[in-house]
Amino acid sequence: MRTIFIPLFLNLKNPSDHLRSLLKLVLLLISLMGCQSKDSGRVDRDDVFDEKFICLGEVGAKNSIVYLHGFTGRNWNGREQSNLKNLRKIAARMDVRIAVPMSKKSCEIRGGEQRCWGVNMTRTQALETLKVTKRAAAKCFEPDSNYGVVGFSNGGYMATKIFGYCLAPRHAPNLDWIVTVGAAKLWGSGSRRSDLRACRPITLVAGKKDKYNYERRQNRFRQLRRKGAKVSVLLFDGGHELPYGPLITALRKYLR
């Protein structure tokens, strides 16, 4: 039970003002009591921490994921709205809490301003994005929770760079694994590292009809395997999208 102290300034010379002040206090207390409820451990709607930061799924879920979005406007565009719908279903089905931060970085794409995680995909940008995942984890998850990163499109490219620069072991030890979707053309290591054995495991998901990100010969994938990366590939019949079924298949490898 939380105690709330509310300063009340009364004008004793005017009884009607006194009554109005008392009425305001009663109404305020009623509204505060209405906001208090026993914590059932469930979340019936998204937890909104600020305008551009939400959490999906139940508080205290067994598994934790940070989602890195693709190109979007200042508000979620149609594609990302669809992605969020799939993520909500996955959170409910697989006992996952999902943190969804929106990047503050603006990129000029096709003559318009879009929110993104970076275009040049430098090591500095990868480190900045990694810090965002840590802040998101602190907001949504239990303290010291281990988590994975799912990145779509531009977010998947950046997640690939976080993997390739091998940043997680040193800079985000609680980040256990990475899944990228619609980012297969940037399967390169992100650096000239010759040994990727110490990097976190990564699964690359790509639609066979994604003309920008499907690579039939999977040359980059084989290159990463030669460098010792713990990498796997999941292909599905579809285009540039965050697919519900194939993503569940990819996540089963990592979730409890």
Image (cartoon, rainbow, N blue to C red):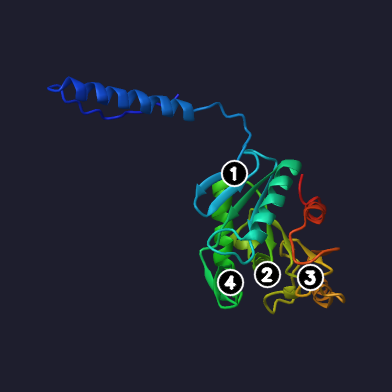
13 sits to left or right of 147: left
Residues tagged 3 and 1 counted as in contact (Cβ below 8 A):
no
First in sequence, mark 4 or 2: give its number.
Answer: 4
- For label 4, the residue is 118
Residue 201: image tag: none
Residue at the far front in the pictured view = 16
Q: CA distance from mark 4 to mark 1?
A: 27 Å
First in sequence, mark 4 or 1: give its number.
Answer: 1
- For label 2, the residue is 157
x, y percent for residue 167: 63, 65
Residue 46: image tag: 1
- For label 3, the residue is 210
Residues tagged 4 and 1 counted as in contact (Cβ below 8 A):
no
Q: What residue type is disc 2 on?
A: Tyr
Q: Residues within 10 Å of mark 4 (few under 14, many from 20)?
A: many
First in sequence, mark 4 or 3: give its number.
Answer: 4
Q: CA distance from mark 3 to mark 1?
A: 30 Å
Residues tagged 4 and 2 counted as in contact (Cβ below 8 A):
yes
Q: Residue at x 65, y 42 (%)?
A: 57
Above or below, 238 relative to 63: below
Quarter of the image where one finds residue 155: bottom right
Quarter of the image where one finds residue 26: top left
Quarter of the image where one finds residue 77: bottom right
Q: Give the quadrant of the C terminus.
A: top right
Q: Label 2's element?
A: helix
